[in-house]
Image: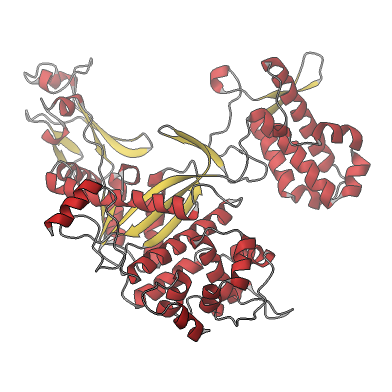
């Protein structure tokens, strides 16, 4: 096999990625690293280390399971990378799905990325310190988008389908099968809903009534308890709680009504982060960011970012930028909620940077301080400037003009007056301190018009919860106003290209699987595949393409040489 490869790629032909990876990194994924997911008894199975490499190569070439299994049987470069004989018959494509399920069931979702980074660390291609950058992008789930009426009907239908497959005898004994089959034979989103709002409302109430009747039968004493634990039944219960209420009318009859928002005078709907969006993927959520509205997840990608003297990404002589961490959340999780989790992941791999470049969504005063104190890194991000009228107008006394005595819990204004109250509170979800001055001293003050526009005639200022947080915020505001900081921060923009590559090469924008853990495994595999793709380009001497350089500028550079 090795001799055949050498003959095929002798001369100037570049070796394909699988061959290059095998030659440069050797056995990347050892079977021992996946032993927890595979038993020692039973019929012999395929090597889990080989299956892990196949899964990564599959993502490099963006192949389906069937095409990946075919590549193992027919592609000489894959056989070489996997250490197989020429006559090896391969395996059935279903083995790859079973492998992914085992990996998830035993909590090994990040194992392939961990093993690759450990190998690269041993070879000095990636290390702690230096600079890294992080950004997130939206991921569309692998389920259809449903409105509230469609969701109600599909939850009932999904539960019926699951029970008809798991306990057909129970369904036959409890339900009027022909009637229920007529209503729920086809997917609810496969036909058009009534155009009339009144008819849609009537249809939604009918779905709700059927759902409650179904649950009543499931929780009756004569029904087996295990039926209630089916995922589709649990999704039905959640949907009913979130979307319907049962009331009693004037005649004493139970009536099923749809929940209304508080603005409509109803009982209120659950917040988006808890609201079920599909019976087939209980983890997916609806979210919006800027002009993007989607149903799915978010993926946060962190990568190294070496720089050249010009401040741009490093040249071909330096190792390529490599992905060091991948985090997946549902679509409603704010970026700042993931900052600490990302640092924990980097710390676990011993890859914490000295400087971490992120956008403003990942940074607060508290996170800047905790990143410095807990992880010893500088969180570099633009923060909000002082939003007071004085700061916006650049005239008068902004907050920085006041002297703060944190020990005495007192502030002194530029005119020498001291505050009368120091009140801890919560504003916009952040712990803050509101400091107020007395109206008796502010009203007659000759500088009052330069200090406050309050109708009460007195000034108040808002501080962060601790002195360290306030000082960190003030320092960040001062630094980001300088040209040096703005030039240094340009490096963060490079992560946008990584996200673009992930979308174009591995199809990360659309989830292939259902459920948060499966989607996270997909993202980890995609990150590992991107790292191998970048390493292959670096090994073959292909530098990063300057995508923002026009053809005319390139011609000018060539003529200048």
Q: Is residue 166 left or right of residue 129?
A: right
Residue situated in front as seen by the camera: 529 or 107: 529
- Image coords of residue 236 (percent x, y): 72, 39
Task: Identify which residue is drawn at 74% across, 29% down.
Answer: 208
- Image coords of residue 284 (percent x, y): 57, 44
Q: Can residue 273 be seen in this snapshot?
A: no
Residue situated in front as seen by the camera: 398 or 421: 398
Residue situated in front as seen by the camera: 46 or 383: 46
Task: Identify which residue is drawn at 67% across, 67% down.
Answer: 95
* Residue at the extreme bottom: 3
Q: Quadrant of residue 486?
A: top left
Image quadrant for the C terminus?
bottom left
Q: Can residue 239 be seen in this snapshot?
A: yes
- Image coords of residue 517 (percent x, y): 56, 56
Residue situated in front as seen by the camera: 138 or 468: 138
Q: Is residue 278 left or right of residue 32?
A: right
Report the number of numbered marks.
0
For residue 560, above or below residue 316: above
- Image coords of residue 226 (percent x, y): 79, 52
Q: Is residue 97 left or right of residue 263?
A: right
Q: Is residue 220 left or right of residue 104?
A: right
Task: Identify which residue is drawn at 30% across, 38% down.
Answer: 432
Colour setup of the view: secondary structure
């Amino acid at each position: 096999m090795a001799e055949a490869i050498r003959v095929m790629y002798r001369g100037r032909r570049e070796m394909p990625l699988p061959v290059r990876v095998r030659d440069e990194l050797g056995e990347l994924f050892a079977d021992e690293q996946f032993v927890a997911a595979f038993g020692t008894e039973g019929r012999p199975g395929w090597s889990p280390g080989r299956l892990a490499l196949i899964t990564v190569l599959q993502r490099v070439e963006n192949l389906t399971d069937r095409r990946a299994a075919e590549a193992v049987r027919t592609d000489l470069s894959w056989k070489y990378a996997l250490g197989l004989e020429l006559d090896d018959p391969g395996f059935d494509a279903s083995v790859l799905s079973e492998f992914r399920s085992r990996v998830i069931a035993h909590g090994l979702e990040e194992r392939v990325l961990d093993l690759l980074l450990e190998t690269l660390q041993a070879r000095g291609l990636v290390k702690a310190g230096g600079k890294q950058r992080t950004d997130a992008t939206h991921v569309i789930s692998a389920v259809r988008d449903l409105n509230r009426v469609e969701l109600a009907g599909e939850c009932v239908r999904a539960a019926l389908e699951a029970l008809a497959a798991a306990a057909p005898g129970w369904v036959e004994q409890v339900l009027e099968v022909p009637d229920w089959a007529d209503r729920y034979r086809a997917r609810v989103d496969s036909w058009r809903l009534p155009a009339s709002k009144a008819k849609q409302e009537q249809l939604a109430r009918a779905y709700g009534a059927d759902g409650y009747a179904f649950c009543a039968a499931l929780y009756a004493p004569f029904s087996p308890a295990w039926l209630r634990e089916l995922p589709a039944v649990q999704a039905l219960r959640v949907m009913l709680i979130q979307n319907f209420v049962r009331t009693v009318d004037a005649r004493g009859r139970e009536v099923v009504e749809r929940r209304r928002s508080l603005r409509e005078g109803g009982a209120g709907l659950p917040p988006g982060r808890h609201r079920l969006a599909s019976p087939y993927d209980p983890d997916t959520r609806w979210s919006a960011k800027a002009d993007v509205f989607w149903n799915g997840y978010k993926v946060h990608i962190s990568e190294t970012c070496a720089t050249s003297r010009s401040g741009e990404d490093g040249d071909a002589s330096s190792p390529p930028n490599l992905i060091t961490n991948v985090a997946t959340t549902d679509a409603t999780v704010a970026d700042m909620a993931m900052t600490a989790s990302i640092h924990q992941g980097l710390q676990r791999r011993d890859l914490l940077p000295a400087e971490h470049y992120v956008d403003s969504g990942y940074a607060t005063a508290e996170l800047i301080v905790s990143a410095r104190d807990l992880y010893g890194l500088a969180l570099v991000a633009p923060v909000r400037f002082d939003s007071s009228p004085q700061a916006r107008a650049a005239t008068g006394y902004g907050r920085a003009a006041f002297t703060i005595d944190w020990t005495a819990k007192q502030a002194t204004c530029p005119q020498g007056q001291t505050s009368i109250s120091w009140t801890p509170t919560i504003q916009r979800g952040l712990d803050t301190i509101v400091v107020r001055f007395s109206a008796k001293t502010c009203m007659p003050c000759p500088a009052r018009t330069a200090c406050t526009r309050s109708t009460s005639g007195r000034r108040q200022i808002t501080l962060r919860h601790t002195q360290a947080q306030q000082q960190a915020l003030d320092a960040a505001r001062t630094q980001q106003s300088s040209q040096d900081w703005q030039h240094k921060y340009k490096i963060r923009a490079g992560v946008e290209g990584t996200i673009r590559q992930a979308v174009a090469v591995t199809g990360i924008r659309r989830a292939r699987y259902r459920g948060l853990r499966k989607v996270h495994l997909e993202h980890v595999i995609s990150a590992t595949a991107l790292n191998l793709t970048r390493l292959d380009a670096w090994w073959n001497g292909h530098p990063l393409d300057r995508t923002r350089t026009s053809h005319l500028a390139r011609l000018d550079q060539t003529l200048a040489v």
